[in-house]
Image: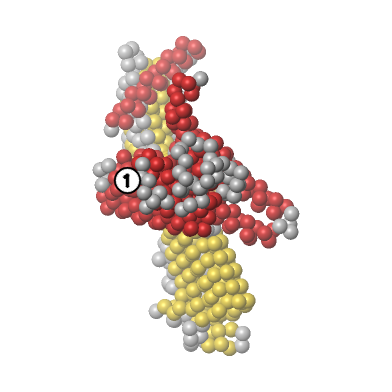
Amino acid sequence: MHTDRINRGLATVAFAALAALLGTAQGLTAQDTLEAGARPAAETRRGGDRIVVGRDVEIGRDEVVEGKVVVTGGDLEVQGRVQGNVTVVGGDLRIVEGAAVGGSVQVSGGDLENTGTVNGDARVLGGRLVNHGRVLGEMRVEGGEQRVAGRHTAGDGRLRMRNRSFLGQFSDGLSGLLSTIALGLLLAGIGAAAVFYAHPRLDRVSDSVRADTLRAGALGVATNFLILPAYVVGIVILLLTIIGIPLLLVFVPLFPILVMAAGACGLVAVAHALGERTAERRGSWDAQYRNSYAYVFTGLALLLAPLVAANLLKMTVFLGFAGGLLEFLGKMGLLVAASVGIGALLLTRAGSDGTWRWRGTRDHDPVFDGPPGGSGTGV
Amino acid sequence: MFERIAGPRARRAAGGAALLAAIALPVWAQQTWRTMTSARQVAGEQRLAVDVEYGAGRLSVQPERGNLLYRMEMRYDERAVSPVASYDRGTGRLRLGAESRKGRNNRDDRRGEGRADIALTPAVPMALKLAFGAGEADVKLGGLALEELDISTGASETRVSFDRPNRAAARAVKLEAGAASLVVTGLANARTQRIDFEGGVGETTLDFGGEWTRDARATVKMGIGSVTLRLPRSLGVRIEKDSFLASFDSNGMVKRGNAWYSRGYERAPRKLDIHIEAALGSIEVDWID
């Protein structure tokens, strides 16, 4: 309701300014009548257009307007006939039984109720259209609701914009929570496998994340933008070479899988880096905290914590908005982490670049980082 | 200079914020949802040619209960698609649905946030052509006056039903499915003599239940996947099969020559001849009472 009033107010001010500008710049034609709220004007006029600003207008039962009617900042009731188009901005339009509009009608920021006849289209922007009469053209409502026949049962013609139920929101939150937990378990599995089978590589990528965060991030973002073009170009090239067409069967599904795998590995590397940094900051030098498994799991918990919290908030229903915002930030965080991780994977050639060396400022840990100047090899 | 003033930590924070903004802004700005309702009253139309095209999202089609020619409610991402509702009174051609904006994909639609609910008049005979891309579609055609029906779906889950008899006798019913799950029920209510189904990959159920008023012929072409034919026991059914690596569960039908016949085929008041071409998969017959 407040929004409607604000819309109407804004529309009135905007249209008044526009009308004043047009009146000053171009002058009014002899047949036009501009009626402002503060200025008394003739109520009835046959022939020409009728433009009214800032007050309600009624076109009487015996009245015929040969041109168009424009009303802004007020309501319009048509009891007689308008041969041209009717436009109402910031007000309601009512066309009563027996009344007729020869052209189209358009209402912005108000409602349209028709029990008469409209020969053209009837359009409503941000309001309701209730039609019990005849509209020969299209009836269109944007951003509002529409009832198009009086005998329809209540709600039959309404846009389905009802608020979600309590159960629906709780269920959304629960399903989001389960999805996040499933994602966490999947990434933890990938992380554990990476530590077990490819620890030196993971360590290099993780060190790269920590030492070259911005460079890795920039490279990751650039890669994100290039992924889709590369996919399309790859498909086109395979199609053009004709003999490459059978390879499409492999390329088309494999490329997205590789991209997703790279994203997951990148996330794991970032999680490792986060966990390592957290352990260092906490000063936990015990071996049970200083191993790559603990780093990965700690980092994943940190990365996914906002999403878990967001879904818990959504389950409370009342804090759903805060949950939505936190979910967005959490997903953005994951996207940033994945981008940085992908960038680090590229910088270190998936951790295989033995020439890459730590250039960061952390303290060297001879137990876990291996010999000075080299990347870590211990778990 | 910045480093001297703010220190390396602040520089990192600023860099991180810039990175976050670079990634977040395009995502934040990518969807703008709008709602739109379009409708038109019946004005003495004799015949309609209706084209419904909807790329992705949730689509529902059903008969209109009032005096409207059509009614379409749509929720859409205005950056990705624009709604289509055009009608040429002269030719009786009605186009409904949504079309992608140039260079844009309709992203919402894997999550089913975009939707179109379409109601069509049962009072005017029509040729209905419906093309649906990806998502879920629920198409209820019972009670409409369909003279012709052509439905094609892409990667979707589509249900088509004729829960009431067609008000007109359809010349032909044509169904095409890409990589889809398609369930069609009450095909007898379409009141047609010819049904053509062509499927690429997926799972299809064709239910020939309903009110049989004439004999009919159906062709079923399937690439890879399973086809279940649900057939009324009272119907005389003859199936001819031309398959490569597709199994066929005839469920009690009797083979004579190159064809399978239902029990009591000769005595059945209405007959259905089905010709099946399948490459890989399974064909199954279920009997319904």
Viewer-side residue, B87 vs B114: B114
Viewer-side residue, A283 vs B198: A283
Q: Looking at the figure, which quarter contains the C terminus of chain B?
A: bottom left
Tell me which corner region of the image, top left, top right, bottom left or bottom right, holds residue A373.
top right
Q: Secondary structure at mark 1?
A: helix
Q: How many marks?
A: 1
Viewer-side residue, A332 vs A143: A332
Q: How far across and how far down the image is residue A274, in percent?
A: 42, 43
Reading the image, the residue beneath label 1 is A309
Q: Is residue A163 above or below residue B131?
A: above
Q: How far across and how far down the image is residue B198, in percent?
A: 58, 66
Residue positioned 73% across, 57% down in the render: A242
Residue positioned 41% across, 28% down in the render: A87
Q: Is residue A11 above or below residue B234?
A: above
Amino acid beneath label 1: Ala
| Residue B260 can be seen, yes or no | yes
Left or right: B245 with respect to A269?
right
Residue positioned 46% across, 71% down in the render: B207
| Residue B172 can be seen, yes or no | no
Q: How far across and how far down the image is residue B84, in percent?
A: 51, 44
Residue positioned 53% across, 37% down in the render: A359
